């Protein structure tokens, strides 16, 4: 792929089509060498975007220094393991310790990103290049549960809801058709197979929804009685992410790194150190960014509590926008307005160590996937690894928006208590302290995590202020000296692929093969659809 075609592909990905359809470019990232020897870059933030930018810029000959405010690289790519300390902002705005993770050795839980779609080619490419082993991540199994408790409590299997709904609707449509020609006959036959209908095009249940009883040598298995259509409709199951796995971003096959999502961060750190030395400075919180009159950028920061200044030719920042707007800068009013235009999403997770993998037992037979509930925990993720082993870890809540805001306002012990109660409505074993010990539970409210302040940028394509801000953030400030990085300025908010896409795009702008002026139109990403599925 030539540099020009790479630029065209990047431009299309960033300012043309929005959303997951923009991720199909698989070409190599080929750009001309650095325009002048020894050009320097201050990379702010050691999340996936900052690490990607530092690695690729370093390969092009730029001398990069990565400033990371926290004591670890990775940003929202965070995997919890035994001994890890979790912190959030307390009532006074100062960081406080919320948990000291006590998972057993070898157990872990991804507190941030937890899956990689098969069409996220940049991410998969880096994993291949850096030797990060991957395994399948199971988004959905037909044994997963949908639990709804508004008035009448329902606890249905995924396969029941999916196939009984399909059967009822196919039968209803078939009843409206009058056989007039061969085409009508073909459509009726399609509905028969599509809905698993009887020969008279009625629906009385299907083995697709499971068996009424386990088969034995005497009886052929009979289908489970269908859930009445009225009950399905009354439940409103489709409003609780039931069809999210059908959306392109979550379609099989998905992957996860063997041993935890932070294996990707560790691989980037290893490659950077091997090729360029110790370019990542942890515990380095940026306090001011100044575009200098004589050219370049000055970044003031505190390293281990001591003030320092880094001057560079360019500055690329993956600092989350809610954090960036609290830093002293001399940006233009238009750029300041863009930084202040969008809020980050409230989102929380809960992780449990369970001392037995009860969901894999005879009663549930669940091996991966997600169960959904209208309880504030919203969803339960079952591990897609280490099947049939002893202990395991489960994501016992993953919620968003107002639900997450209220959940995050609870003290960590109260979050665990509420999460335990919600998960026990799906699996009573969660109520057993001997099986799911409170001491081995952890929580995180990303909108309260220092240096993060949210899960992802909450872009709304219907908001004209967001239209202006998104376009502004795709363009550098200060005559091409300061650039915003990250999934926050990409068509894939909330995804690591978006962070990498943004890094590649900004590098193209620095190199001059992608225009620093963004033409119309710019399509603003729909953050809700891209992180929670279509509604």
Image: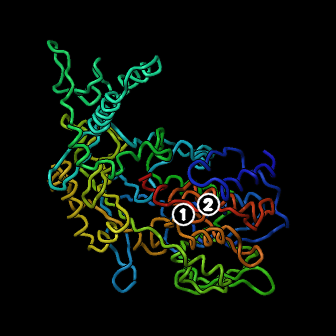
Q: Position of residue 129 (x, y in %)?
A: 63, 45
Tell me: 523 left or right of 298. left
From what the image shows, is residue 28 above or below residue 342? Answer: above
Callout 1: few (<14), some (14-19), or many (20+) C-alpha neighbours within 10 Å?
some
Q: Quick one: which residue is furthest to the top in this view?
A: 218
Residue 33 as seen in the image, left or right of residue 99? right
* Residue 230 position within the rendered picture, expressed as x and y whole percent measured from the top left: 21, 42
Report whether residue 73 is seen: no
Q: Which residue lies furthest to the right in this view?
A: 36
From the viewer's side, name the closer residue of 23 and 353.
23
Distance from Cα at disc 2 to Cα at disc 1 = 7 Å
Residue at figure coordinates x 62%, y 66% from the top left:
485
| 484 w.r.t. 7: above or below | below
Question: In the structure shown, which secondary structural element does the residue marked by tag 2 occupy?
Answer: loop
Q: In which quarter of the image is residue 375?
A: bottom left
Q: Is mark 1 on a helix, strand or loop?
A: loop
Whether residue 157 sits left or right of residue 213 in the image: it is right
Lower sequence index among marks 2 and 1 = 1
Q: Mark 2 points at which residue?
A: 523
The image shows residue 169, relative to residue 345, as above or below, that is above
């Amino acid at each position: 792929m030539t540099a020009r075609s790479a630029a065209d592909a990047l431009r299309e990905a960033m300012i043309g089509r929005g959303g997951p359809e923009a991720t199909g470019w698989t070409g190599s990232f080929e750009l001309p060498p650095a325009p002048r020897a020894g050009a320097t870059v201050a990379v702010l933030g050691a999340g996936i975007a900052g690490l990607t930018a530092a690695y690729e810029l370093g390969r092009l000959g730029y001398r990069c220094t990565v400033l990371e405010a926290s004591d670890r690289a990775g940003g929202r790519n965070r995997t919890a393991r035994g001994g890890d300390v979790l912190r959030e902002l307390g009532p006074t705005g100062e960081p406080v310790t919320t948990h000291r993770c006590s998972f057993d050795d070898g157990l872990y839980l991804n507190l941030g990103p937890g899956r990689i779609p098969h069409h996220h080619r940049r991410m998969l490419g880096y994993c291949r290049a850096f030797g990060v082993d991957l395994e399948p991540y199971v988004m959905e199994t037909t044994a997963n549960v949908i639990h709804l408790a508004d008035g009448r409590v329902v606890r249905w299997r995924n396969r029941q809801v999916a196939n009984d709904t399909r059967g009822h609707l196919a039968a209803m449509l078939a009843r409206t058709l009058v056989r007039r020609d061969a085409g009508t006959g073909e459509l009726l036959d399609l509905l028969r197979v599509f809905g698993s209908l009887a020969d008279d095009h009625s629906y009385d249940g299907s083995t697709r929804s499971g068996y009424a009883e386990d088969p034995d040598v005497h009886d052929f298995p009979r289908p489970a009685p269908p859930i009445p259509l009225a009950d399905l409709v009354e439940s409103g199951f489709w409003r609780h992410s039931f069809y999210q796995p059908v959306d392109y971003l979550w379609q099989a096959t998905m992957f996860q790194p063997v041993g935890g999502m932070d294996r990707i961060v560790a691989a980037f750190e290893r490659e950077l150190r091997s090729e360029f030395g110790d370019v990542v400075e942890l515990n380095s919180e940026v306090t001011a960014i100044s575009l200098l009159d004589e050219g370049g950028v000055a970044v003031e920061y505190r390293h281990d509590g001591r003030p320092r200044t880094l001057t560079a030719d360019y500055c690329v920042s993956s600092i989350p926008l809610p954090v960036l707007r609290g830093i002293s800068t001399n940006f233009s009013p238009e750029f300041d307005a863009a930084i202040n235009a969008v809020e980050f999403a409230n989102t929380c997770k809960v992780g449990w160590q369970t001392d037995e993998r009860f969901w894999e037992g005879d009663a549930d037979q669940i091996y991966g996937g997600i169960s959904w509930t209208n309880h504030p925990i919203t969803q339960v993720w079952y591990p897609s690894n280490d099947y049939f082993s002893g202990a395991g870890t489960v994501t016992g809540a993953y919620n968003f928006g107002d639900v997450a805001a209220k959940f995050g306002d609870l003290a960590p012990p109260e979050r665990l208590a509420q999460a335990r109660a919600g998960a026990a409505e799906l699996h009573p074993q969660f109520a057993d302290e001997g099986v799911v010990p409170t001491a081995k539970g952890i929580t995180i409210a990303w909108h309260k995590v220092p240096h993060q302040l949210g899960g992802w940028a909450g872009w709304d394509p219907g908001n004209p202020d967001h239209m202006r801000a998104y376009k502004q953030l795709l363009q550098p400030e200060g005559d091409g000296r300061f650039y915003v990085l990250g999934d926050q300025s990409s068509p894939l908010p909330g995804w690591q692929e978006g962070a990498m896409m943004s890094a590649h795009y900004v590098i193209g702008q620095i190199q001059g093969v992608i225009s620093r002026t963004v033409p119309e139109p710019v399509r603003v990403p729909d953050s809700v659809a891209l992180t929670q599925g279509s509604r």
